Image: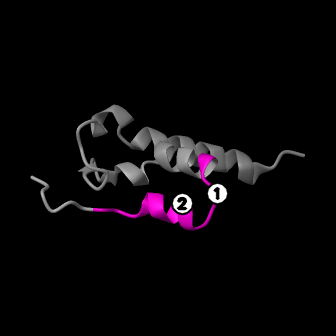
């Protein structure tokens, strides 16, 4: 039996990734700068990589914490 929820979830994720800018546009920007309304750490590809590499808990929370520097231009 085919799990239709899994299939529709894959399509939804593909649409979300195609609606976000390519990662290359974040070059030279801070992680909290938005490109087309998406911050680097909220980009679906970045979130998927972090979630695959970092266990849940404090370490992942630290990665998602935005630290703004006072010398930002």
Give the mark nearest the N terminus, 2 or 1: 1
Tell me where residue 20 appears, x and y as whole percent.
39, 43
Q: Tag on residue 60?
A: 2
Badge 1 crowding class, 10 Å Cα cut-off, few under 14, some 14 to 19, many 20 or more, is few
Tell me where residue 68 appears, x and y as whole percent.
24, 62
Label 1: state its secondary structure. Answer: loop
Contact, mark 2 vs mark 1 (Cβ under 8 Å): yes
* Residue closest to the far right: 1
Per the model, the C-alpha gap separating discs 2 and 1 is 7 Å
Regarding residue 34, the answer to whether it shows in the image is yes
Between 13 and 51, which is closer to the camera in this rendering? 51
Between 58 and 13, which is closer to the camera in this rendering? 58
Q: Residue at x 60, y 43 (%)?
A: 11
Q: What span is in magenta? A: 53-67
Label 2: state its secondary structure. Answer: helix
Q: Tag on residue 46?
A: none
């Amino acid at each position: 039996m085919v799990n239709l929820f899994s299939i529709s979830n894959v399509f939804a994720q593909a649409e979300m990734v195609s609606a976000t800018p390519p990662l290359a546009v974040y070059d030279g920007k801070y992680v909290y700068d938005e490109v087309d309304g998406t911050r680097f750490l909220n980009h679906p590809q970045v979130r998927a990589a972090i979630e695959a590499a970092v266990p849940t808990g404090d370490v992942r929370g630290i990665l998602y914490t935005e630290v703004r520097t006072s010398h930002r231009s």
